[in-house]
Image (cartoon, rainbow, N blue to C red):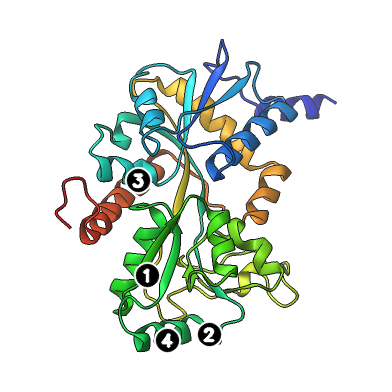
Amino acid sequence: MVAATALAAVSTPVLAWEPVKPVEFVVPAGTGGGADQMARLIQGIVVKHKLMKEPLVVVNKSGGAGAEGFLSVKEAKGDPHKIIISLSNLFTTPMATGVPFNWKDMSPVAMMALDQFVLWTNAGEPYKNAGEYIAAVKAGGPNKFKMGGTGSKQEDQIITVAIEKATGTKFIYVPFKGGGEVAVQLVGNHVNSTVNNPIEAVAQWRAGSLRALCVFDAERMPFKAKVTDTQSWNDIPTCKEAGIPTDYTMLRGIFMPAGVTPEQRAFYVDLLTKIAATPEWKEYMEKGAFNPKFMTGEAFTKWLGEAEAAHRTLMTEAGFMAGSSK
């Protein structure tokens, strides 16, 4: 008993700071989407495992493609009772709209995961792999094939432009309101392909309506349990393997306002580290086919700087920057 007590004391250090009132957990997107689902999962894990004394309260602030949420955190400088979950709109929204905000206006806490994107086609089409599909798009000529995606000047359209530049193709990009609608449109053959997240198209893939051609990441997804009768997520080749030399993953990260103390940030780093180790989180990572990369500190800050530069290049080349004449 003495040994067990000593071990508990080592594994659960006394923190120099912890919240003294409810913590507002900002979601810069609407309810029901990927960011909202992840935030509410984190909230549920905190409650189930009693990881905080004070409640974590999820608040959706989706106005201006997420700008409302980001600006609310920028304006809360020094407030340790406010955190925000971020997607790659952390970069794209200010670049596309000119809103006065940058990720450096906040304090990075942790990368929780990277969201994947998969190139999908209708399973009834003859393309068995990404190479065959791209060859068909080239043979068809520019603006003959339709790529469905969520929104404009955001991740799905950025990836579409990257595919075009990497392969010498040209798609008609068709925006829809959400990933679920995008998958339905592809099943109905109203578009020729999509770059949906795995979780947005998994039901149609499992049902045999869609075909997964490649994943836009440097490595294959690690999950080897069969999702369809014949394939796991790990069976999907990377797009580079398949002859499309481009990759793109979407950030799922947690930030605090600027001006917080190291002790305040350390509380949330410790909290999120514990959350990432729970069975509930690991199950969610596999269910959604995320890249379960967890990162804090200088490594996360370095990653953010590189990701911002990469997005600036992609947005500039696509003519998506605010004030662009394209």
Residue furthest to the right: 1
Residue highlighted by disc 3: 304
> Looking at the image, is mark 1 or mark 4 nearer the viewer?
4
Of mark 1 and mark 4, the one earlier in the sequence is: 4
Is the C-beta separation of discs 4 and 2 under 8 Å? yes
Residue highlighted by disc 2: 127
Q: Which mark is residue 246?
A: 1
Residue at 52%, 83% in the rendered image: 129
Tag 4's secondary structure?
helix
Inspect the image, locate mark 3, and give the three-letter code of the amino acid beneath it: Leu
Residue highlighted by disc 4: 136
User: In 3D space, how far apart are the residues under numbered discs 3 and 2 (Cα atoms)?
Assistant: 36 Å
Inspect the image, locate mark 1, and give the three-letter code of the amino acid beneath it: Thr
Q: x, y (%) of residue 67?
A: 35, 33
User: In 3D space, how far apart are the residues under numbered discs 1 and 3 (Cα atoms)?
Assistant: 19 Å
Residue 257 lies left or right of residue 7; in this view the side is: left
Of mark 3 and mark 2, the one earlier in the sequence is: 2
Q: Is residue 111 visible?
A: yes
Of mark 1 and mark 3, the one earlier in the sequence is: 1
Residue at 67%, 48% in the rendered image: 284
Tag 1's secondary structure?
loop
Of mark 4 and mark 2, the one earlier in the sequence is: 2
Inspect the image, locate mark 2, and give the three-letter code of the amino acid beneath it: Tyr
> Looking at the image, is mark 1 or mark 3 nearer the viewer?
1
